[in-house]
């Protein structure tokens, strides 16, 4: 039966309507995967010597930071790792045992790149440990314990999938521990390193993560079995309808009508709520750059890069899927007498308002100095005047139907990747960095700020002409977009 499932998955891939896009994406992802594997191998092989040269005990140093490594791994999984599933409903009417379906679905996640990539880091490191005189049995049991913990993260990702409240709570706790350690208030690694050192020093402790993995596998299996019914877990959920008029937006005419629809969409759907949450987290992205904690980020170009991102969270997460947010009823919209310009204007105003609010909320960056906050302000001007147009232009080529009931993929989707959108995306980040560096070289950093702000102001000045051009592109791509939104596979 497992062989039959694998055969169906193979057929599904090659018969997919987006097969060509998938091939291009997988080639690109394959190159990125090879790069990551090379980096992990480099660290795994050379990390031991590097830590020894710094006067550190390699094993104890790794054990000390493992808690944050596992936390970061889980966060990345929750944000990016998709849960492979079968087309389950047709299976339930066939003589296939439900445990077989569930075991195959879980087994697919075990072979995920998110699990296998860690072997290229810890396996070479373990071999180096053995070559440098560490006990072979203890080293291999330590490696087995870490493998169990990575698969525990894999199972947690399945259980926590779409549980936004638990994810937010977990993220806040992790950030809180990291902040307390950074400011010297509380160091969680003092306690967790005892456990990880014990995994190496006491052979019996391998039973702890091994038993935890088995127990969690049983829990995950029961969780999926419980929802594997057409009239329960797989049934469509219907929420109680609520009427929200937002009459105060009527004064803005057609733009107000579209704004009301967008506000309702954001409030009522899981995917859009997750996207707004991600845009809020972008506000804190600048702390990695402006705090000076990471030397590679502590330079003017990267500071300008961060200035664009701090206020561009909503623009990059919500804006990149215009008009895909409306994919479920886009064909109906196209049968109405709706001007594209009014539709795009409403999206533009939504992005501009969100960017302005983000700029005000980011005022805490004044702690790092006035110039840093001015970089964020001019980044916001650039986002509103220039990047907002690029995002809407890219939307004409991003033919990705969005499942509003799902919270997965807040950062993107495989069918959103194509050469046109990638080329359009380059000026979003590279141009302001180049403008800032040019102004700094010609005179001083303040002139760099003027250059970036001027690009945004020019975008405002030529907004009508730019919108007319974008409108023509949307019209030329209209039928290709409608066809893409009909594809469900």
Image (cartoon, rainbow, N blue to C red):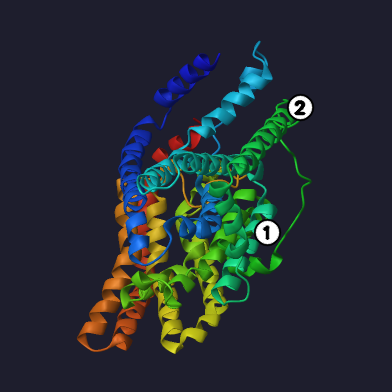
Which label number is shown at residue 169? Answer: 1
Q: Residue at x 39, y 24 (%)?
A: 14
* Above-or-below relation of 87 to 323: above
Q: Residue at x 42, y 73 (%)?
A: 289
Image quarter in which the N terminus is found: top right
| Percent x, y of residue 315 | 47, 63
Looking at this view, name the residue that lies furthest to the left: 442
> In what element is the residue under mark 2?
loop
Earlier-in-chain disc, 2 versus 1: 1
How crowded pointer 2 is (Cα within 10 Å; few <14, some 14-19, many 20+) is rated as few
Report which quarter residue 212 is drawn in. Answer: top right
In this view, the residue in front, 395 or 156, is 156
Looking at this view, name the residue that lies furthest to the right: 240
In this view, the residue in front, 384 or 374, is 374
Question: Is residue 258 visible in this depiction of the protein?
Answer: no
Q: Which residue is mark 2?
A: 231
| Percent x, y of residue 458 | 33, 75
> In what element is the residue under mark 1?
helix
Q: How many marks?
A: 2
Looking at this view, name the residue that lies furthest to the top: 95
How crowded pointer 1 is (Cα within 10 Å; few <14, some 14-19, many 20+) is rated as few
| Percent x, y of residue 84 | 54, 33
| Percent x, y of residue 184 | 58, 76
Q: Residue at x 61, y 25 (%)?
A: 103
């Amino acid at each position: 039966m497992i062989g039959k499932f694998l055969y169906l998955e193979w057929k599904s891939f090659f018969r997919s309507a987006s097969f060509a896009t998938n091939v291009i994406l997988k080639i690109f992802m394959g190159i990125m995967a090879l790069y990551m594997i090379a980096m992990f191998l480099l660290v795994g092989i050379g990390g031991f010597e590097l830590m020894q040269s710094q006067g550190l005990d390699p094993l104890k140093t790794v054990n000390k930071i493992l808690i944050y490594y596992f936390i970061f791994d889980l966060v990345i999984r929750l944000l990016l790792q998709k849960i492979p599933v079968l087309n389950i409903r047709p299976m339930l009417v066939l003589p296939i045992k439900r445990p077989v379906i569930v075991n195959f679905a879980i087994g697919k996640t075990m072979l995920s790149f998110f699990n296998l990539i860690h072997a290229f880091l810890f396996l070479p490191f373990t071999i180096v440990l053995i070559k440098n005189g560490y006990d072979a049995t203890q080293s291999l049991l330590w490696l087995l314990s870490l493998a169990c913990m990575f698969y525990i993260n894999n199972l947690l990702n399945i259980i926590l999938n779409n549980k936004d409240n638990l994810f937010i709570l977990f993220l806040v706790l992790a950030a809180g521990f990291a902040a307390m350690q950074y400011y010297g208030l509380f160091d969680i690694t003092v306690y967790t390193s005892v456990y990880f050192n014990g995994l190496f020093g006491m052979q019996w402790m391998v039973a702890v993560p091994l038993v935890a993995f088995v127990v969690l596998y049983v829990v995950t299996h029961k969780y999926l079995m419980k929802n594997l019914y057409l009239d329960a877990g797989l049934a469509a959920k219907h929420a109680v309808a609520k009427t929200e008029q937002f009459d105060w937006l009527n004064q803005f005419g057609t733009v107000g009508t579209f704004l009301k629809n967008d506000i309702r969409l954001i409030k009522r759907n899981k995917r859009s709520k997750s996207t707004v949450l991600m845009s809020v987290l972008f506000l804190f992205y600048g702390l990695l750059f402006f705090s000076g904690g990471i030397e590679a980020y502590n330079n003017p170009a990267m500071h300008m890069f961060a200035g664009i991102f701090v206020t561009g969270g909503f623009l990059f997460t919500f804006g990149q899927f215009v008009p895909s947010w409306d994919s479920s009823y886009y064909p109906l919209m196209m049968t109405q007498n709706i001007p594209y310009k009014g539709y795009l204007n409403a999206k533009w105003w939504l992005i501009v308002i969100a960017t302005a609010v983000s700029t005000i909320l980011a005022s805490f960056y004044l702690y790092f100095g006035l110039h840093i906050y001015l970089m964020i302000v001019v980044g916001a001007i650039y986002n509103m005047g220039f990047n907002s147009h690029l995002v809407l232009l890219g939307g004409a080529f991003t033919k990705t139907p969005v499942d509003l009931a799902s919270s997965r993929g807040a950062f993107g989707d495989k069918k959103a990747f194509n050469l046109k959108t990638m080329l359009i995306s380059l000026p979003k980040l590279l141009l302001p960095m180049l403008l800032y560096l040019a102004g700094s070289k010609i005179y001083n950093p303040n002139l760099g700020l003027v250059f970036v702000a001027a690009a945004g102001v020019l975008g405002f000045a030529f907004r009508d002409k730019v919108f007319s051009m974008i409108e023509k592109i949307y019209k030329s791509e209209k039928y290709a977009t409608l066809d893409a939104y009909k594809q469900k596979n």
